[in-house]
Amino acid sequence: MAKVAGVDLSTVSRLLRDDRAASYRPETRARVLAAAEQLGYRVNAQARALRLGRQDSIAILVPDLDNFGFTAVLRGVQEACEEAGVTLLISEIGSSAPERTDRLAALAGRVDGVLVAHAQDTDTALQAWLDDIRLPSVFVQRSIPGASVSVLFDEENNAAAMVDHLVAMGHRDIAHLSGDLSTDTAKRRKVGFDSAMAAHGLSIPRGRRADGGWNIEGGRAAAEKLVAGRKRPTALAVDSLVQAIGMLGALHAKGLSIPDDISVITIDEHPLAAHTTPPLTTVYLDQRELGRRAATALLDWVDGTPAQNLIVESPSDIIDRGSTAPPVAQ
Amino acid sequence: MAKVAGVDLSTVSRLLRDDRAASYRPETRARVLAAAEQLGYRVNAQARALRLGRQDSIAILVPDLDNFGFTAVLRGVQEACEEAGVTLLISEIGSSAPERTDRLAALAGRVDGVLVAHAQDTDTALQAWLDDIRLPSVFVQRSIPGASVSVLFDEENNAAAMVDHLVAMGHRDIAHLSGDLSTDTAKRRKVGFDSAMAAHGLSIPRGRRADGGWNIEGGRAAAEKLVAGRKRPTALAVDSLVQAIGMLGALHAKGLSIPDDISVITIDEHPLAAHTTPPLTTVYLDQRELGRRAATALLDWVDGTPAQNLIVESPSDIIDRGSTAPPVAQ
DNA sequence: CTGTTAGCGCCTTCAT
DNA sequence: ATGAAGGCGCTAACAG
């Protein structure tokens, strides 16, 4: 490359990087540019990273790609990275421990920091690994004990918004189909649900809560449990859209019509919510903004500014698509 | 590291890489291992890549992460990479041209090859870029003119399977809700649909096909169009699950009941198909295997064996979940 | 069995 | 305005 242009390689390096402190003879510039064009030259990212000690890239660990509850966060992260000129690598976190460790190790050398979008409290291996690599890491919409930094929603608020909406419609017997209670997100929503119920003077009898594990099948099984008794709740608050899909399957299979027989509300995580049968009334969540903020926090950290824990304000507005209605006597 | 262990760095390198051709004094091995443990040492992937001229990593370009029609392929790719000890980087391909070019350029330096899981025929920029970087690239379940290598299903077969099933049930007036007809996948399915209809002696009157663009909204709009006329088709064959979601929304909004008023069948792309209302009868697709094969082909190519175009056999079995029934007179 | 050496491609002083 | 030289961390000959 340098040879073709007939200049020193350091000149090429400076020129191509558009080094502001330097200036060049028009002829030199032209020669270098022409040579680069002709050779289809592009800098070697590895060599650059080695020299600079910086990758200009971050990774985000996601639970599994089947799970579409997370895509809006990814969009926000992607945008923030784009704007910062940083490459985003998305990686499934993997379920088995050894598989996970290997994958993480391979990733660690390729990025300047990592966003974690999934973790159970019990996931000590992940925590250990993060401690070990000493790479900046930020947890997104989920956290674990001892987590470095996390960027979260006010999940208590979000759960409370479901309760408030249902109570305003006249419901008093409300069941909670929660997310995986070994995750802090679900725990915080549980607290929010309970407090909101209490604030309305309502109790939560036994059998009115089931853990739906953040996935379709879990949502289905939990819903079946919740409506199995003689006296059904008049409404269901579901922690995530993915689980709500399973819930819908269960209710339809049981011949229940929504919202006539039972009202349902969930948290908004995907455009899909507008296209289920029936479309779902949801609590709006600005996941995209959450993703942006988390990515920005991580990127700042990489640049030297330590990140802070952050709660992203989200309006908790209700998007009413008609899956809730006042209760009818059974 | 080498200093702490009191040995030469080349010894460390060999030993840690578990070089089979070499053997070591027990004491040396112990010292190196201890030092590595103590220091939390891990090899610098960049330096390694620079030295070896190999990244041990490939990328897959996906359309957008909202789209869950593709996750099973990813799973297969991920598995194959895992087995080969290669890191998989997933990246959204990006919609705007400049954004896309930048992202691709950044990616190019970090991988040994790239899998492409989305492309429209009109996407000449992508093609140009692929030609430009001279990196092994394999198209997955989709191809474009001039594509290097592609790993595909027999899509004509898949579309024909939908027709055959519907005709076997007694349908003769079948509409085709196709995928984005600027993609070769949709084109091939269209051919398969038409041939199968012809083979059954059936024609496809005007108004019995609509392009649903591979997304929910497109599926919805296309379905509305297809059932708008005075005389509805008795069955709908839908090219993808994502579109089928939109289709369900449209049919329900129109008050049509499935399969009583109209039968629907689609191609199986996600566990979601079992949980829609009603659950969808589908043509089984082994996307996971497709992903494995594509990844394997790419990895072989990276290792020097040029890849070949490949059609992955898929049984085209029908998974009957009850969304089709014999037609009733309107 | 282990040390020495060269060089992967790049960026950054330091000269000129 | 541009060239010269060192070194980022690693691996692969080649010595010994």
Image (spheres, coloured by chain):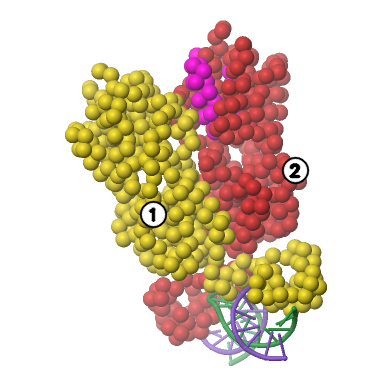
Chain colours: A red, B yellow, C green, D purple
User: On the image, numbered disc 2 is attached to which residue?
Assistant: A145
| Residue A112: % across, % down | 63, 60
Q: In what element is the residue under mark 1? A: strand
Measuring 66% from the left and 36% from the top, which residue is drawn there? A185
Q: In the image, which is nearer the foreground, mark 1 or mark 2?
A: 1
| Residue A104: % across, % down | 64, 55
Please tell me which residue lies in front, B241 or B66: B241
Measuring 56% from the left and 56% from the top, which residue is drawn there? B83
Q: In what element is the residue under mark 2? A: loop
The quarter of the picture where residue C6 lies is bottom right
The answer to whether one can see residue A245 in this image is yes
Q: Which mark is residue B306?
A: none
Q: Amino acid at mark 1?
A: Val
| Residue A289: % across, % down | 56, 43
Residues drawn in magenta: A235-260
Q: Amino acid at mark 2?
A: Pro
Subunit of mark 2?
A
Image position of A65 (left or right of A150): left
Subunit of mark 1?
B
| Residue C1: % across, % down | 75, 78
Q: Residues at badges 1 and 2 in contact (C-beta under 8 Å)?
A: no
Please tell me which residue lies in front, A41 or A213: A213
Question: Is the residue B271 above or below the residue A130 in the image?
Answer: above
Picture quarter with the C terminus of chain A: top right
The answer to whether one can see residue A325 in this image is no
Question: Is the residue A123 above or below the residue D13 in the image?
Answer: above
Measuring 70% from the left and 24% from the top, which residue is drawn there? A194
